Amino acid sequence: MSSKTTPTFDILITSDRTMMTNHHGREFLGFVTTGPPLGLPEKIWMWMCAPKPKVDEVGRPVEAPYGLRKVEAALLDAGFSAAIIDPDHLARHLRHAKVLMIGHHDYFALNSPSIEWWLLTGKEPVNRRSFLRLMRRPEIREAKRRGLKIIVGGPAAWQWLWNTNFWREFGIDTVVDGEAERVIIELAEKALAGEELPLYVYVGPPDTPRIDEIPEIKGASVNGLVEIMRGCPRNCSFCPVTLRPLRFYPLDKIEKEMQVNARAGLRGCILHSEDVLLYGAKGLEPNPDALIKLHVLAKKYFKTLAWSHVTLAEVRYAQERSNLITKLTEVVLDENQDYLGVQIGLETGSVRLAKEIMPAKAAPYSVEEWPETVERAMAILHEHRIIPALTLILGLPNETEEDLIATAELLDKLRDYRSLIVPMFFVPLGQLKSRSWFLREHIKDEHIEVMRRCLWHSIRWAEDMLSKFYLKGPQHAPLRLVLKLFVSYVKWRGRQVEKWLNSIRTG
């Protein structure tokens, strides 16, 4: 298409390459963008975890991050001229645009697991490198000199408060912290009118949009992600999501977004919420009818299905209460799909610490049953070919050596359950945002032991998954080979990694 017929947009929406990608259709590969390139050149590392997406003739990606799609939809519904543009195609559009909006999950690699990769290796993660390269591109700097307004937001908006030097360097006009669908319209109006913008907008619980104020996406989301609810009732003190009200999307709203993704040719879907098993629930009581209808609907449009998150307590309760995990996997697992992936927060194996930071995490079971609930839920997941990526938090406030020993002992009990286990350093968010960060110098012997067990557990099951489940088919052969070589490299270096972790303790 010639430049004469290229459409112009007043508002551009984008992110850097680590976000504007579909990770080869495997969402878990997105975690690889949080680390530095280890054992590989950065170009190959980026190809492995963040390949360039398909775009149309003007640079609009076929798939884009879901949060950007929501902002785009809100602006389009309000009548603005707006579009999501791939970062490699920004230059020609910035000559005309008046506003640039940017979203990200981890602008400066301060979230987990980026921050522990950075602290442990001393090497800058690729997501941070990629974002800084984007913001320093000549076309963005030139457009800013011409008066371009830059508005940033997304789950990592809080990181700008810790990086005011970059706020100034990049000329950020507004940071939006929280759900943006309601506030973004007024900000866009002010920006286009040349009015002064607020430096920082915090969207608290009273300002969050109602379900009827949340628009349906107009273009496909990365890997078919579709939100089914917002908020979480468990009130874990380290999590900002619990500060938002609980809202369920009706099935017809969910179906409209599924249809958008299916029309774009996507063959897979990710159901997104903080706990998929709470969709339609009353309190913590699962709603089998609503969940089965939801999964039948998803399989109507897509060959494969994944969950973004569930909780271990709800897995146990749903199965013990109504055999619900069995019923759902009977819907999902078929000739097109032989496993289901999900991310789950394990957090800690310590009952004492669980009482302090997440007393409702085990509900409806008692918090004293947390380790037992974890083990039972993991057995259920393993039996039903649901493969979790578990995250646990090191360095929680008031953590003791006994807490870490309890976590290590629980990890031993999980040895035979297929999963990846990713240790994460505590980042002060949610109700704990005023607490201190967990830093490299805080690492004790017990932290090293937990990390060591996570490493060997994950290597064992990564090899199993690559041989039995992950990236099947000849089209994935090159990527599968690179991943197998990388896992072999990590395994070969495993003993050296243990020495490396020990060296942190001593110096």
Image (tube, grey):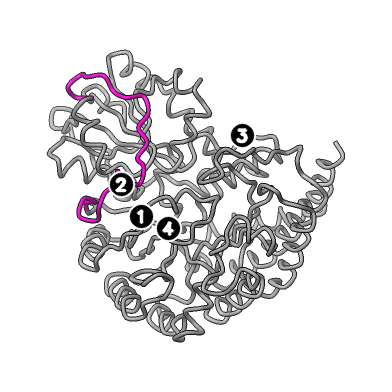
- Residue designated by label 3: 124
Secondary structure of the residue carrying tag 4 is: helix
Residue 360 is marked as none
Separation (CA) of disc 1 from disc 2 = 8 Å
In the rendered structure, the answer to whether residue 69 lies left or right of residue 406 reads: left
Relative to 170, 349 lies left or right:
right
- Residue 500 lies in quadrant: top right
N-terminal-most mark, 3 or 1? 3
User: Disc 4 and disc 1: Cα gap in Å?
Assistant: 31 Å
Tag 2 or tag 1, which sits nearer the N-term?
2
In the image, which is nearer the foreground, mark 3 or mark 1?
1
The mark that comes first in sequence, 3 or 4, is 4
Distance of label 2 from label 3 (alpha carbons) = 34 Å
| C-alpha span from label 3 to label 4 | 25 Å
Q: Identify which residue, 339 or 251, lies in the foreground.
A: 251
Identify the residue at image location x=37%, y=36%.
202
Q: State the mark number for residue 208.
A: 2
Q: Tell me whether circle 4 and circle 1 mark residues in contact (CB < 8 Å).
A: no
Do the numbered discs 3 and 4 sit on residues whose CB atoms are within 8 Å?
no
Residue on which disc 4 sits:
25
Residue 446 within the segment the image draws in magenta:
no
Q: Earlier in the sequence, mark 4 or mark 1?
A: 4
- The secondary element bearing badge 2 is classed as loop
Three-letter residue code for mark 2:
Thr
Please name the residue shown 71% across and 71% down the image.
415
Q: Are marks 2 and 4 in contact (CB under 8 Å)?
A: no
Q: Amino acid at mark 3?
A: Glu
Residue 414, image x, y percentages: 68, 71
Which residue in the structure is indicated by mark 1?
245
Residue 464 placement (x, y as % from top left): 63, 70
Q: Which residues are magenta?
A: 191-215
